């Protein structure tokens, strides 16, 4: 049999190292065709990739030589991490696992004056443990760039992949959907040498590779194998078009555009039932040979197909190695109700990072049984975290740690007050209070066909000129606050675009927009009777609006700096505010006059919160402390000290006997309200904790963190009861449903997830936002779940469309 192609050996061997798919020709095909984040590639020549277009560049860019899809919407990369380069020194080559390094050589007396990593005459020796092997070495340490946000890619591919296929068809390319590669990462260097070896004569023999890589004008590679005649290995080097015939010695003069590894996503749709190949003898898909079902696996080449009236002949699989991502797409479609499968090479690496990628990957997946995450659009993905936390292996780069472009550190988060604005509302187990008895929304006596006060109010609103648009079309800037009215009729959103939008939860339409009278709306709060809306901003003012009529009712003035948070007392008679001016203030809710100013904090105040009985007020912020105040007198009851970082939020238990605080230091602390004593310390998280909430009976406590997890613990013993780990990035908000059966979480991976509180299983993933989701709030009646994102969009969902009437959990302890 003819030996496999050199490029196939090379890709098969080095892809198992976990860096991504190795490229047999790392040089860009042209100056305008460099592989970058957002590139869409296809294979035109075996072993090489060709650029179709770049989703992250404008349509008029020179790289878009084939044009762009109809109605092209550019991809906006989020959460890009960069690793390396490390300092310049001698670097060993990357070898396949089938090769064992014996020695790394360097001619110390002939080092180049520019300090090249491999000096003149440098080389390495290895032995081959089986018949195939591959290696790559390079002139300067590579730089790894990777897109960390998996959901951002999945959302974009789901929306626009069909248009990519249409573009390929218009260009005369006959491609399957899974033939397109969406680039999410790469490793690049300046110049390189790579090779593959194959044959029984190599097994157990000592081989010597000599790379005179310092002499770029005449780069030379020699390979010898135990001084015996064997099949010559396949060696290539480059970039030849830039090096040959030159006298370049300084690698700093070469661009780092040689892409030696790529990370990528692929997508496959389930074929319609009518297009499936007929099954002989009533065979089900579970008994068909892998790869023989065009719906869920790689199709058998057309030349092997048999006519319907011929005998079925067993045909060996094609010799060409299957792409490992194709195996994942097959697994997803075969083992779920997904209509679309999206997977990446990083999924494979993470799944088998402990055991190594098996030779039979399809069987390895069957044995491993990885979890499939199915979103509301029936898009299936593998539930793993594809983020690259550390630099590539020591031989590749040991430079600076990753630069997280999207996820703020704890220090940066302190400078982003929009997070604190969501903390009180996100942390409360039961948001808001029910409408006050006797309010205008109670049913009129008489029943029958008589119009209720609520219906009359809706009629009045219908007569007013309103702006109608779907809830998906919201703000032009980041959404900084989200609130649901206690009667569950309204959702209010505030943004850095200086506007407030009032939404109707019934038809998800915009009722009205206000110019907020402040530059940025940091926090919104409805009064307990749902008649008024308070909005705090960065000019030291809080504006009160009439919800029904849209009129401005008054302004709370007195703070000297940004007001991050505003809350109503449970009885609606007072408001409390916290500000960058380090003060907490209590206001009369009728006259809008200040009652008292509470001083004592030594830094900005990020949250204030009334106790359920309205007698106490908790406040905290950047001075690492939480303070409990007596509302009636303004007296400081306790200063709760112990945290080593900013305190983001707090939560009272239902009986107001304990208060819990969450901090940047990764801990949750539970204190006695009566004595101020620290009762329990929870060290469950490895990152800042943004959310804390007691269950309705106070026996358990939930916390959510930047470490992408949610933990539920016994609030008395501190024992962990449950860990919810399913997001790809930090959890920005978490909340119990009013009936206690569910948990909603919002994450920087652009998703909202709904969980069964009883067992922690994921019931549904809402993958509708195009940027990090900062708020997720249940309505008090439990009928809707609303979310807000940095993409400026508001999503209001009717939960009955996603949850069975009887529910999946009873919410009991």
Image: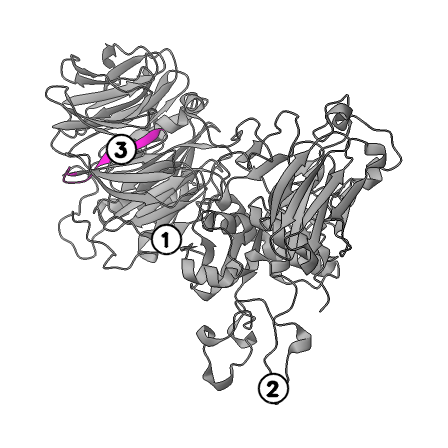
Q: CA distance from mark 1 to mark 2?
A: 42 Å
The residues colored magenta run: 688-699
- Label 2: which residue? 308
Q: Residue at x 74, y 32 (%)?
A: 255
Q: Which mark is residue 692?
A: 3
Q: Which mark is residue 764?
A: 1
Magenta residue check for 401: no
> Which secondary structure lies at badge 3?
strand
Residue sitting nearer the eye, 602 or 455: 602
The image quarter containing residue 556 is top left
Q: CA distance from mark 3 to mark 1?
A: 22 Å
The image quarter containing residue 484 is top left
Q: Residue at x 37, y 47 (%)?
A: 753
Q: Residue at x 39, y 13 (%)?
A: 561
> Which secondary structure lies at badge 1?
strand
For residue 381, above or below residue 85? below
Residue sitting nearer the eye, 282 or 191: 191
How packed mark 1 is, by other alpha carbons closer than 10 Å (few <14, some 14-19, many 20 or more), is: some
Task: First in sequence, mark 3 or 2: give its number.
Answer: 2
Magenta residue check for 697: yes
Q: Horizontal placement of 670 versus 15: left or right?
A: left
């Amino acid at each position: 049999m003819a030996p496999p192609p050199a490029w196939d050996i090379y890709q098969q061997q080095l892809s198992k190292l976990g860096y991504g798919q190795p490229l047999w020709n790392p040089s860009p095909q042209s100056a305008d065709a460099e592989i970058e984040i957002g590139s869409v590639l296809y294979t035109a020549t075996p072993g090489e990739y060709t650029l179709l277009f770049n989703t992250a560049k404008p349509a008029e860019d020179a790289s878009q030589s084939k044009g762009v899809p109809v109605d092209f919407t550019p991809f906006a990369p989020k959460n890009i991490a960069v690793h390396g380069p490390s300092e310049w020194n001698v670097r060993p080559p990357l070898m396949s696992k089938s090769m064992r390094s014996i020695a790394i050589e360097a001619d110390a007396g002939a080092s180049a004056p520019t300090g090249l990593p491999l000096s003149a005459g440098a080389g390495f020796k290895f032995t081959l443990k089986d018949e195939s092997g591959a290696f790559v070495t390079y002139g300067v340490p590579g730089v790894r760039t990777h897109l960390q946000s998996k959901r951002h890619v999945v959302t974009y591919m789901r929306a626009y992949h069909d248009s990519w296929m249409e573009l390929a068809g218009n260009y005369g390319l006959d491609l399957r959907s899974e033939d397109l590669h969406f680039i999410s990462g790469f490793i690049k260097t300046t110049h390189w040498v790579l090779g593959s070896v194959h044959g029984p004569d190599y097994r157990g023999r000592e081989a010597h590779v000599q790379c005179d890589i310092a002499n770029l004008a005449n780069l030379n590679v020699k390979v010898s194998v135990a001084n015996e005649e064997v099949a010559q290995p396949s060696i290539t080097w480059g970039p030849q078009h830039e090096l040959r015939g030159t006298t370049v010695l300084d690698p700093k003069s070469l661009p780092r555009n040689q892409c030696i590894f790529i990370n990528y996503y692929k997508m496959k749709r389930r074929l319609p039932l009518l297009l499936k190949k007929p099954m002989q003898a009533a065979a089900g898909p579970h008994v068909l040979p892998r790869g023989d079902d065009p719906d869920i696996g790689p199709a058998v080449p057309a030349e092997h197909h048999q006519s319907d009236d011929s005998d079925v002949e067993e045909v060996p699989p094609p010799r060409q190695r299957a792409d490992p991502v194709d195996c994942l797409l097959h697994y997803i479609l075969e083992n779920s109700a997904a209509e679309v499968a999206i997977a990446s090479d990083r999924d494979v690496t993470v799944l088998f990072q402990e055991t190594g990628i098996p030779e039979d990957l399809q069987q390895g997946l069957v044995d491993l049984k990885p979890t499939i995450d199915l979103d509301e659009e029936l898009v299936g993905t593998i539930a793993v975290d594809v983020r690259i936390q550390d630099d590539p292996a020591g031989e590749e780069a040991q430079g600076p740690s990753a630069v997280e472009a999207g996820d703020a550190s704890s220090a940066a988060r302190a400078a982003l007050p929009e997070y604190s604005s969501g903390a009180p509302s996100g942390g409360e187990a039961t948001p808001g209070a029910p409408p006050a008895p006797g309010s205008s929304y109670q049913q009129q006596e008489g029943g029958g066909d008589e119009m209720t006060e609520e219906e009359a109010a809706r009629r009045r609103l219908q007569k007013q000129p309103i702006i109608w648009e779907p809830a998906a079309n919201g703000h032009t800037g980041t959404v900084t606050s989200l609130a649901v009215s206690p009667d569950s009729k309204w959702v209010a959103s505030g943004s850095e675009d200086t506007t407030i939008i009032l939404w109707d939860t019934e038809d998800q339409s915009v009722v009205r927009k206000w110019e907020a009278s402040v530059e940025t709306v940091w926090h919104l709060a409805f009064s307990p009777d749902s008649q008024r809306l308070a909005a705090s901003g960065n000019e030291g003012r809080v504006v009160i609006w009439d919800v029904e009529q849209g009129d401005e009712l008054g302004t709370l003035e007195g703070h000297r700096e940004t007001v991050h948070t505003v809350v109503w007392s449970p009885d609606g008679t007072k408001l409390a505010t916290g500000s960058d001016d380090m003060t907490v203030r209590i206001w009369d809710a009728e006259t809008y006059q200040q009652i008292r100013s509470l001083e004592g904090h030594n830094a900005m105040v990020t949250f204030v919160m009334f106790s359920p009985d309205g007698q106490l007020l908790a406040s905290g912020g950047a001075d690492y402390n939480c303070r409990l105040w007596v509302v009636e007198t303004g007296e400081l009851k306790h200063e709760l000290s112990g945290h080593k970082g900013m305190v983001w939020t707090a939560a009272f238990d239902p009986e107001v006997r304990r208060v819990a605080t969450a901090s940047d230091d990764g801990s949750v602390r539970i204190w006695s309200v009566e004595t101020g004593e620290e009762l329990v310390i929870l060290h469950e998280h490895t990152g800042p904790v943004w959310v804390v909430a007691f269950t309705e009976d106070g026996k358990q406590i939930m916390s959510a963190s930047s470490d992408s997890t949610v933990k539920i613990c016994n609030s008395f013993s501190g024992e962990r009861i449950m860990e919810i780990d399913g997001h790809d990035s930090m959890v920005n908000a978490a909340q119990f449903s009013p009936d206690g059966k569910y948990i909603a979480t919002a994450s920087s991976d652009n998703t909202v997830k709904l969980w069964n509180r009883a067992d922690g299983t994921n019931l549904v993933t809402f993958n509708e936002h195009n940027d990090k989701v900062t708020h997720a709030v249940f309505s008090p009646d439990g009928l809707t779940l609303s979310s807000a994102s940095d993409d400026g969009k508001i999503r209001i969902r009717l939960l009955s469309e996603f949850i069975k009437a009887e529910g999946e959990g009873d919410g009991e302890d």
